[in-house]
Image: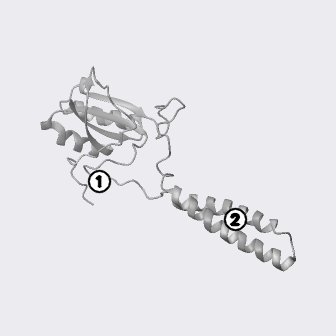
Amino acid sequence: MSLIVAARFTTFAEAENAAQALFDNGFEEVNVSIFFVNPPGMHHALPAGGDEYADRAAQPAHATVIMGAGIGAAIGIAIGAALVWALDLQPVVAAIAGGVGAYGGSLIGALSGMRTQPQTRDDGIAMDTRPSGVLLAVHVELGTETFASNLLKNHGGKDVERASGRWRDGKWIDFDPVVPPVLSNKVTPSRA
């Protein structure tokens, strides 16, 4: 396995400028690769398309959907029963109100249960998903890892990562866009 350092850039021009800085500092072209990573969910890893069977942000919503449906149904039945009693309507009105309440409650429960906090970006810990963008990957040795990581960061690279992979003919051949990056702990923190 090869040691690889990579960083995400907004444009190809920014990545090419960082690559030029690597070349100016002794890195060879065969050890640098620039490519685009599609947004999460658009990698067509599954037969029907996409990369995952379920959206990660929606997974925690299952419990809140059930809870919301139950609360909504109870409120709907209570309102329906009050209407039946007050307006002398048929009892089916309470059942219909309960169904409408369950539906509305399930929608509210689903939306409230979806995760909205941003990804954590801690060194040495995998992110939740790999963001889209232009990725500049560099095949490095242990002695050049810190230098390459900081050079990428100083030239506008975001989410500088450290990975093990197979590097052949100037390319990271086993790169998997679905695997979340593990951020490098070799990057010197920026001074504010």
Disc 1 residue type (three-letter) = Asp
Specify whether 35 is left or right of 113: left
Residue that sits furthest to the bottom in the current view: 86
Count neighbours of disc 1 (C-alpha within 10 A) and say few if under 14, some if 14 to 19, many if 20 or more: few
Give percent across and percent down for residue 17.
32, 35
Mark nearer the N terminus (2 vs 1): 2
Identify the residue shown where x is 37% and y is 38%: 14
Q: How many marks?
A: 2
Identify the residue shown where x is 40% and y is 38%: 178
Specify whether 64 is left or right of 106: left
* Residue 73 seen from this side: yes
Residue that sits furthest to the front in the current view: 91
Identify the residue shown where x is 77% and y is 74%: 81
> Pointer 2: what residue?
101
Mark drawn on residue 122: 1
* Residue 111 seen from this side: no
* Display colour scheme: one colour
- Is residue 56 positioned above or below 167 on the image? below
Give percent across and percent down for residue 156.
33, 44
- Asked whether 154 or 45 is in front, the reply is 45
Disc 2 residue type (three-letter) = Gly
Q: Quadrant of the C terminus?
A: bottom left
Give percent across and percent down for residue 39.
47, 39
Which mark lies nearer to you, 2 or 1? 2
Residue that sits furthest to the top in the current view: 169
Helix, strand or loop for disc 1: loop
Name which quarter of the figure residue 190 lies in. bottom left
